[in-house]
Every structure is written in C-alpha cells, then in structure tokens.
Image (cartoon, rainbow, N blue to C red):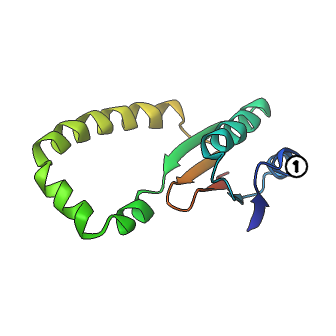
C-alpha cells in the first residue's frame, strides 16, 4: 500500500485520480485537517466517500481501565449506543456504495484511504 507522509496534497490528489488505496501518516498536529483534506479531494473528483473510525485499535489501547469505565457507565452507554446506531444507519444510507472509505486511526494518528470499487 502506498504511504503519504503528512499533508502532501499533490501526492494525495494523484493517488485519488488513479483510484489507489493509501495511508496518510505523520498527522500528529493535523489529524482533523487531514481528514477534511482527503474527503474534500475525493468529493471534488465527483466520488463519494465514507469516513469511519478504527474502534478495534482504540479499544485495544483502552485496557482494563477502559473496561472498568464501560461497566460503570452501562445505562448511559446503552442510551448513547441507541443514538449511535440510529446515526450510523443514516450515515450508511447517505454514503451508500462509496468509492472510497477513509478509516480514522486516532491512536496512531493515521488515515487509511481504501478504494472500494
């Protein structure tokens, strides 16, 4: 898989035009800007994208402390989960059959941009 270091706009644009999957690394201070840049470039090329989070990686870094917090906040979590599922279904319908999927890895501050078609 191709790797882009930082917000190299020319390289990102080139990879998107050739419909290539890639990773964007080195986004410590520019993580949100990186997401917006990639999403905007995809849409400017007339394609659709879906932005999702890598929850598996975040859960693995949570450890025992995260598990204890989850158990203690179960009622609130169930309510939040219901709203999250409803929002997720709406988002999935709005981005049905995307050209690209952008996976946010909050732990490592990297984006994985996968061409889906």
- In the figure, is residue 105 to the left or right of 69? right
Q: Which residue is mark 1?
A: 14
The spot of residue 71 in percent (x, y) is 13, 57
72 and 15: which is toward the camera: 72
Q: Which quadrant of the structure image shows residue 37? A: top right
- Residue appearing at x 63%, y 42% in the figure: 35
Q: Is residue 39 visible?
A: yes
What is the x, y in percent for residue 2? 77, 65
Q: Is residue 26 above or below residue 61?
A: above
Name the quarter where the N terminus is drawn: bottom right
Q: Residue at x 66, y 36 (%)?
A: 36
Quarter of the view holding residue 61: bottom left
Give above or below for 51 relative to 15: above
User: Relative to the observer, which residue lies in front, 7 or 43?
Assistant: 7
Residue 115 visible in this rendered orientation of the protein:
no
**Coordinates of residue 52 in the picture (x, y in percent):** 50, 47
- SS at mark 1? helix
- Quick check: 68 left or right of 43? left
Q: Is residue 83 above or below residue 75?
A: above
């Amino acid at each position: 898989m191709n790797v882009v270091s930082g917000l190299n706009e020319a390289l990102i644009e080139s990879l998107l035009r050739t419909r290539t999957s890639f990773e964007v690394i080195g986004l410590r201070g520019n993580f949100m800007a990186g997401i917006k840049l990639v999403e905007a470039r995809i849409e400017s090329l007339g394609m659709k994208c879906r932005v999702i989070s890598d929850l598996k990686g975040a859960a693995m870094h949570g450890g025992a402390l995260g598990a204890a917090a989850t158990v203690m906040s179960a009622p609130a979590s169930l309510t939040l989960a219901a709203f999250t599922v409803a929002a997720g279904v709406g988002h999935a319908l709005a981005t049905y059959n995307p050209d690209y999927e952008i996976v946010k890895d909050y732990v490592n501050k990297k984006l994985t941009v996968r061409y889906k078609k």
